[in-house]
Amino acid sequence: MTYRMIPGVVIALFAYASASAAEFDAARAFGARNAIEDIAMSPDGSKIAFITPGNGQSSTLYTVDAVEGAQPRKVAVASGDPERFSWCNWVANDRLVCAIYGVVVVDTEVTNFTRIFAINADGTNTKLLSTRDRLDTWVVQNGGSVVDWLPDEDGVVLMRRNYNKRMDVQWKTKEGSGVERIDTRTLATKVVEDAQPMVSSFISDGRGTVRLMSVARWQDSAYNLSPTITYLFRKKGSRTWENFGDYDMVTDAGFAPHRIDYERDVAYGLMKKDGRLAAYTKALDGSGKTTLIYARPDVDISGFATIGRRSRVIGARYDTDYGHIEYFDPAIQKVEASLGKALPRHQIDVVDSSSDETKLLIRASSDISPGAYYLFDRTAKRLVQLLEVQPSLSGRQLAEMKPITYTARDGTQIPAYLTLPPGRDGKNLPAIVMPHGGPEARDRWDFDWLAQFFAASGYAVIQPQYRGSTGYGDSWFQKNAFRSWNLVINDVLDAGHWLVKQGIADPRHLATVGWSYGGYAALESAVVEPSLFKAVVAIAPVTDLGMLKQDSRNSIYARIEADRIGSGSTAEASPAQHASQFKAPVLLFHGENDLNVDIRHSRVMATRLKGANIPSELVTWPKLDHQLFDSAIRADLLRKSDAFLRKSMGIPAN
């Protein structure tokens, strides 16, 4: 198979002008939101829709014909105050369904919402698909979800919609979630599944029939949600719900269905095998037969790769040092292998496709490339670059993200990623230990804007996959990173010691930077071993585990969160309780509308540090949430962080 690269369809229209070295603003370039935040292909493959960032948190939806020289058309703008686009997908060749997300303050409480609407490709005939609510009576946060795109019908979807009796008199008899068939052009609606309380999701067979349903349950009479959900299924041709099995959201015990294969009459899902998640199918004929599809002896299977309007499963995803897909479809595997030759050293993902799968929308990226989107015509064997993900970095030399391991104090080999400044010998550098957030997460080999900014600024960056990270199985996850906090912190500290021992880090210029749980780990590391890190940057950090429990006390997730954090004393594990032990100066960042970690955490930490006479600063931003979804704010964060680190550690300006 051969490929011919031709000029991009619209890349020139959205590429930033190349800047000279003297003009290059690293903070602005690395802090910029992706130039393409979402992208989708029309069913016939003739059009592309994409979302681009604007000022603040705003974003704009465009459509463009997939032919050389076509001009993009502006379809809609989300102001970012508060609504912003999450995604858009084609429901017909001339019509899109889009989701918006926003964070608002209602009666002094910060809350979020999602809404789904339909719009023509030319910006006309906008229709709200989510159920309407009345702000004076009740606000529905979850705007629903698309259950089936019904590719054989024109502009029609199956959609999960949420109802509450307090919303409006027209729905006074409905409660919970149901499924409705909605004509997105006219809003003509037909009930497919009656609304039921405690139903959290539906899965269809891709042919318009709902076959699976998940039902949550209360843990106690105080309306604390149980971590166990029950899946129900229907046999082909039946309307009777039968038990499919339980699944525990905390321990991953049980079978968690993801997709349905209509022809094979099975559900694809994940289930534990030897302490690691593996890919299975489970029969939908009533036998309950499970079949192992793919497993790894070293890491978890993280999910499934799909293609087409029916989300056909084509492979299983997993991460070792690099991201991988184990393909089940030989034809797609052959395509991926050929694309790998055309785009060497890139991770390649099929983002979307035409209904007949002859035209594929591809994203290719790597550690040294934010990536680009390509259109691949399987019939013509032609690959065309469409849009760059981050054109502000086009032509810049970026730093390689190298998988390494280091030895923890108990002898365990800890996987990590090491990113060194381009063109440097990797010796005696200012260095940063950057623990990831989550904590139920892990870092992946790919472009990382934070690590790349610091590397471009002259720092070595190590990202430890500390014990408590996901993806490595039960034994690595331990009790979780909150309950096993002391093990996590030792792994983070040992990453710093390893940098010094290897001669990579100048011990006088060693810092730690983290976001969310990573910010917690950075702060707690400065409590456990105050002399190692000479400066601490914590972005939206947890600072008090007792406070974290309190944050969810009025939530239906209160018991789950309390169990996650642990029932014992939290004072020892809370950096805000030990401000007097700090020696390093601290810089804190936090958005005032953070729903993941309440801003009180940073405010309390800042107050305690000030009381202990520790040099510190708290930078806050109104209307921003945990992700700081604003290019200018992210650039400000990077500038302030670099200046703080240099001043604190006596490093000359870059």
Image: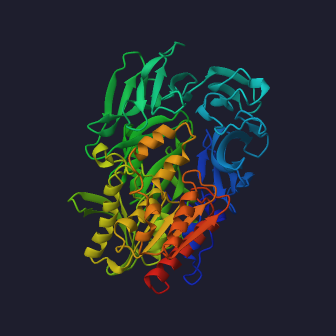
- Residue 134 position within the rendered picture, expressed as x and y whole percent measured from the top left: 77, 36
Q: Is residue 380 visible?
A: no
Choose top left, top right, bottom left or bottom right for residue 179.
top right
Residue 526 in percent (x, y) is at: 39, 68
Query: x%, y% of residue 463?
Result: 38, 63
Number of numbered discs: 0
Residue at 46% in and 80% down:
648
Q: Quadrant of residue 18?
A: bottom right
Relative height, residue 287 to residue 67 (above, below) = above
| Visual colour scheme | rainbow
Between residue 354 and residue 303, name the one nearer to us: 303
Q: Nearer the viewer, residue 157 or 83?
A: 83
Q: Residue furthest bottom?
A: 652
Q: Which residue lies furthest to the left in this view?
A: 411
Q: Which residue is painted at 43% across and 27% down in the image? A: 267
Q: Which of 409 and 171 is in front in this view?
A: 409
Q: Quadrant of residue 151?
A: top right
Residue 1: x and y in percent read 41, 50
Vertical comparison of 120 with 38: above or below: above
Give the left or right position of residue 92, taking residue 125 as reference.
left
Residue 494 visible from this viewpoint:
yes
